[in-house]
Image (cartoon, grey):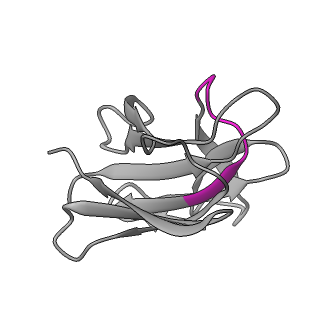
């Protein structure tokens, strides 16, 4: 679960129903209300997400399912373009089982930890 600061949205990955939800963090009844759902036809079970508040981006990595490959996604979380897909990404030799994401302190590299094979993939972040 991640708080998207400035947008008032809490994001969580729903590994059961295969979607990322953006919930409004407050309302009159103190109950969760879905504000937006980030979805894409190529996105399967989401295993990890990372929010970059400086570039207003949400990075997500999905697992493989049957014939589909695991891949990474970059979405806009800017209020004017919230949920728009910016790009997809994957290593040259495909992901195995991606498990977690981290962004470098300077925001230029995105790291994906995998559990099969046991490795860390590094990606350059687009401006």
The image quadrant that residue 53 belongs to is bottom left
Number of numbered labels in the structure image: 0
Locate the N terminus by quadrant: bottom right
Q: Is residue 46 magenta?
A: yes
- Coordinates of residue 17 in the picture (x, y in percent): 82, 43
Q: At 41% across and 30% down in the image, what residue appears?
A: 85
- Coordinates of residue 14 in the picture (x, y in percent): 74, 53
Q: At 45% across and 62% down in the image, what residue appears?
A: 50
Magenta residues, start to end: 40-48
In this rendering, position of residue 106 left or right of residue 51: left
- The kind of secondary structure the magenta stretch mainly shows is loop
Q: Nearer the viewer, residue 103 or 21?
A: 103
In this rendering, position of residue 30 left or right of residue 91: right
The answer to whether any part of residue 11 appears in the image is no
Q: At 43% across and 45% down in the image, what residue appears?
A: 91
Q: Is residue 125 magenta?
A: no
The answer to whether any part of residue 125 appears in the image is yes
Q: Nearer the viewer, residue 21 or 115?
A: 115
Q: Nearer the viewer, residue 32 or 70?
A: 70
Outermost residue to the bottom = 105
- Coordinates of residue 45 in the picture (x, y in percent): 73, 45
Q: At 37% across and 65% down in the image, what residue appears?
A: 5
Locate the C terminus by quadrant: top left
Q: Nearer the viewer, residue 106 or 113?
A: 113
- Coordinates of residue 111 in the picture (x, y in percent): 39, 65
The image quadrant that residue 121 belongs to is bottom left
| For residue 24, above or below residue 80 | below
């Amino acid at each position: 679960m991640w708080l998207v600061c400035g947008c008032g949205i809490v994001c969580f990955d729903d590994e059961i129903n295969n979607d990322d939800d953006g919930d409004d963090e407050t309302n009159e009844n103190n109950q969760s209300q879905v504000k937006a759902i980030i979805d894409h036809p190529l996105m399967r079970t989401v295993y990890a997400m990372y929010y970059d508040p400086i570039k207003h981006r949400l990075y997500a990595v999905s697992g493989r399912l049957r014939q589909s490959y695991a891949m990474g996604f970059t979405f806009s979380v800017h209020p004017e373009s919230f949920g728009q897909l910016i790009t997809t990404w994957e290593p040259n030799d495909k992901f195995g089982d991606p498990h977690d994401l981290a962004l470098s302190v300077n925001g230029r590299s995105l790291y994906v930890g995998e559990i099969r094979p046991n490795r860390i993939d590094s990606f350059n972040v687009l401006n």
